[in-house]
Image (cartoon, rainbow, N blue to C red):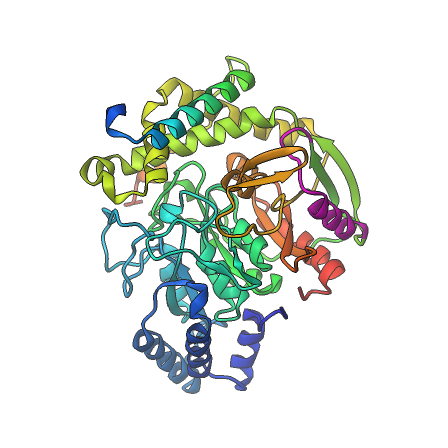
Amino acid sequence: MKRSESLSEQVAALADGSQTASFLAERSLERAKKNAGLNAFAALDERTVLAQAEAATQRRSSGKTLSPIDGVPIAVKDNYLTKDYPTTACSNAAPLEPSGTDATLVANLRAAGAVIFAKTNMHEWAYGATNDTSTIGVTRNPHNLDHITGGSSGGSGAAVAAGIVAAALGSDTGGSVRIPSSACGIYGFKPSYGRASRNGVLPLSWSLDAPGPMTAALEDIGHLLPFFLGADPKDNSTFNAAPFGQISFEGKPKLLSLTGKGLERSDEVDAAIRSALSTLDAAITEAQLANVTGYFAAWEAILHCEATAYHNALLAKNPEGFTSVTRAHLEAGRRLTGVEFLEAQKLRTHLLKVMLNELPDWDALVLPTLPVPAPPHGQDKQKFGGRSVTTQDSMTWFCWIGNLAGLPCLTIPVGKSSKGLPIGMMLMGKPGCDEKLLAIARNIDQSINGGEA
Amino acid sequence: MTDRAELTDDQNDRIDATLKRIRAGLKRGVPSPDEEPAHIFKPEAVNEKK
């Protein structure tokens, strides 16, 4: 699959007048129809899209353009509140949330003139990483329809990979931006915890959630982060958060490749990562991260406790509205104790201390995004590195680390499997150093993909 | 808390496996007693009138 047109290319075409917002919207609608088999969208209204695009076209023709992205179609995961579409989190248990309002990030993009294109399919409540559990059915991977997109932002991943839109919004609690981005061969960015507003994004876990962009090209992320990063009075975690600032990175980045028990990967993925790293002008070292099992338990404890606290009222009111597996997660959360939750939160601090103070100095940590390429639908287990783990756990295998430590993370495509499925490499930066991570990734992407995956 | 009898065997098996995994992991990974949990409490952040 050739990379589709990027958001950056659309921004340039709108600026030089070779394309209009209306043209882009019509083309996206046409591609959405053509790719209906992907099941990427939970809600899409042609009239709503065309009206937004027509307004953008008129603004540009009268010299009143709101921003460089004015007129660019952007799809939104179905757990972001949107004033013109319902928000269901792809669950039959209707959210106890107000409708008719925009999440802060959606409002930011709308104020910049972006065309809010559609709501995308997702794993129910973002509480899983395959996208095979959704009230509207599974999402299919554009690279091979028999394979999953990964999740939970799977519809966003499929829509971007298929070229329906150049950018989409996802949310990430244990990898839900990065997993489908990697599985679908696109770019995905999870900001540092507390730098991007979660207001109006239905929570999964307050300590771990981060919203992020998923795009056709790395450069697109730089166009979108100004609308993501910075303080929002409606989200206390962003108190005093710095707005986006451009930064470049000169010299050789210090890359620390993490290995160890619990960080195994398939031979095919390992070879692709090693091959990608071999092309870089970087100082690359390997380090073992100890006690991965303990940190994973901390992530899982925080996830289940907080998800249960959020859903408790809805679970009491409508238990049958949740799918069986999601309900089991929530019931497990009800049985964890306050002491266990706080022990998990202590491990969270401890992991960050180890990463920042005990590992050899680093500019970016490197891991595969996934230990295996996107599995086929219905395959329950994955075998790699001498292990047999559930497909669910294989999807979050590395990504949860970035959420537990609150690090900025990014996935870039680095190759294809023998079956033609994308393989992604994850970079993680130091907390708050989102711009530096993006600058390092630009140099790396240039070496691996020539700036074009 | 929902009575176990109201849940399916599969749900009960999943709950048991999840709790077993979490408790074993937490036991293995407990940091020193003086380490403070990660938590957010910035009282000034709640003042929307400032």
- Can residue B37 be seen here? The reply is no
Q: Report the front residue among A154 and A49.
A: A154
Residue depicted at 69% across the width and 52% down the height: A440
Residue depicted at 35% across the width and 43% down the height: A203
- Can residue A266 be seen here? The reply is yes
> In this picture, which residue range is highlighted in magenta?
A260-278
Splitting the image into 4 quarters, where does residue A356 fall? top right
Percent x, y of residue A447: 76, 59
User: Considering only vertical position in the picture, is A94 above or below B5?
Assistant: below
The quarter of the rendered structure image containing the C terminus of chain A is: bottom right
Query: Horizontal placement of A119 versus A129: left or right?
Result: left
Residue depicted at 57% across the width and 52% down the height: A374
Magenta segment: does it hold A61? no
Query: Horizontal placement of A311 versus A192: left or right?
Result: left
Percent x, y of residue A350: 56, 24
Q: Report the front residue among A235 and A123.
A: A123
Percent x, y of residue A65: 43, 77
Splitting the image into 4 quarters, where does residue A422 fall? bottom right
